[in-house]
Amino acid sequence: MRIYLAGNPSMYDYQEDYDRLYGLAKSAGLYHLKVLASFVDPKHFDSVVDRRNELFGSFSEKQEIFLDSGAFSVWKSGKDIDIEAYRDFIDERIKDIKVAVNLDVIPSNRDGSRATRKQMDIAFEKGLENFKYLSENTKLPKDRWIHVFHKNDDYKYFERILALGITYIGLAPGQGTSLTQRLAFLDKCMDYVTDSKGYPIVKFHGFAVTGTKEMLTYPWYSVDSTSWVLLGAYGKIMIPKIINGKYNYTERPYTVAITRRSNAKQSKGQHYENLTVTQRELVDRYVEELGFKYGVTEFKIVDRDYKLKSNERWDAAYPDGLSKRRVEIIVEKGLLNEYKLRAQLNAKFMFEVEARNKIEYFEQKHKYRKLFI
DNA sequence: GTCACCCGCACTGCTGACAG
DNA sequence: CTGTCAGCAGTGCGGGTGAC
């Protein structure tokens, strides 16, 4: 399974961040840094390529970019994507694109009402037309185009998709739905993309498959995940469980909140400061082994109209609700005060999952959920 | 003709919602 | 956490209007 890192484009603003990320991927035994970029944010795509170029020279195989068309988010904003612009974008950057997502047509109405069967059929056919157009009119070969099957799509569409010889299918369980619903959707999809024994018959990609549970339950060819950045943004770091004295990357990791501003501090056991001495030692060891530092951060209360210095930032709330605010002073950069560093540390977990979660894992474990129940 | 006032328009900046 | 974007308020300018 390939894990494409999705998420905050500003992760690639600085070379040192890219270098550290690549270093961590390499330390997990991976040869490629895999990144998901979206057509709607060309700057993201280009800065990822620039950073790679700076590290390895003008062209290198050390990176794979998964290009998302962004059809869903653009549709949500009420706009349309120009298919010719998408085609040109791809041809201009063909060297750096490993795989691209078809410009799918979203069937449901923007006001949230459910589309009729007829509207869905039309949207599906339109999506297939786009697939045909893009795979025939760009330099990207057909087997590197993904066609997406959405949460509310009719399962009969799978037969059409497969009959057209599409060999890479995206499964989109949808955001905001519960884990149970997501797993139910994916179980059903497995009837179409795997054989009777549960082995994949085509490649399939899991869109926004963020949880370890989903990642490890199905024989994905690839997934994309934002959890490394998001957890980092929420002030958390991912620490692998230790089983028989070794780090384990097939179980859900501990997520430990470490920032002093974090609200998770109140919820029991989740915050670094609430861990037992032994647990804390394990976290410290992991952080140190990966070459990260906690850093030093201090707080002070100031007037509302205080002007921040370059090493300062506002803390979330106004402590007295009126004239005063709290400022965080970054004395030394580290995991405590830099979300990018936390995200990088979290990416290491992803890299290790990917390095271990080869197809053999599924063969040995005899795959997907249905068989476990 | 001059002045005060009003209104529309473009622009700026703030805020909240939302996504990655 | 950070960036983006829509929506809204505030500002400032120019032109039109009416009172004197």
Image (spheres, coloured by chain):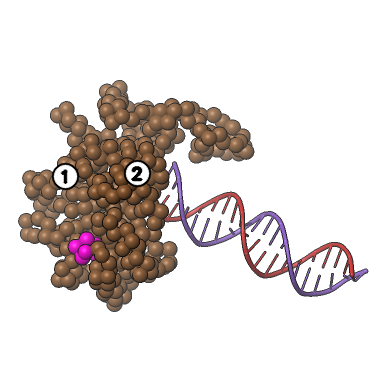
Chain colours: A brown, B red, C purple
Residue at image coords 14%, 63%: A192
Residue A149 is left or right of residue A176, and the answer is left
Please tell me how crowded label 1 is: few (under 14), some (14-19), or many (20+) other residues with Cα within 10 Å.
Answer: some
Residue at image coords 16%, 27%: A245
Between tags 2 and 1, which lies in front?
Answer: 2
Q: How many marks?
A: 2
Residue at image coords 39%, 56%: A42
The three-letter code of the residue at mark 2 reads Glu
- Chain bearing mark 1: A
Residue position marked by numbered label 1 in the rendering: A357
Disc number for residue A298: none
Residue A139 vs A1, above or below: the answer is below
Instruction: State the image coordinates of residue A27 (x, y, percent, origin top left).
Output: 23, 36
Instruction: State the image coordinates of residue A251 (x, y, percent, origin top left).
Output: 20, 39
Residue A242 vs A166, above or below: the answer is above
Which residue is at the front of the view, A366 or A51?
A: A51
Residue at image coords 20%, 32%: A247
Residue position marked by numbered label 2 in the rendering: A54
- Tell me the SS state at disc 1: loop
Q: Earlier along the polypeptide chain: callout 2 or callout 1?
A: 2
Which residue is at the front of the view, A68 or A60?
A: A60
Which residue is at the front of the view, A9 or A350?
A: A9
Residue A171 lies in quadrant? bottom left
The three-letter code of the residue at mark 1 reads Asn
- Tell me the SS state at disc 2: helix
* Residue at the extreme front: A58
Residue A152 is left or right of residue C12, and the answer is left
Q: Are marks 2 and 1 on the same chain?
A: yes
Q: CA distance from mark 2 to mark 1?
A: 30 Å
Residue B12 is left or right of residue A276, and the answer is right
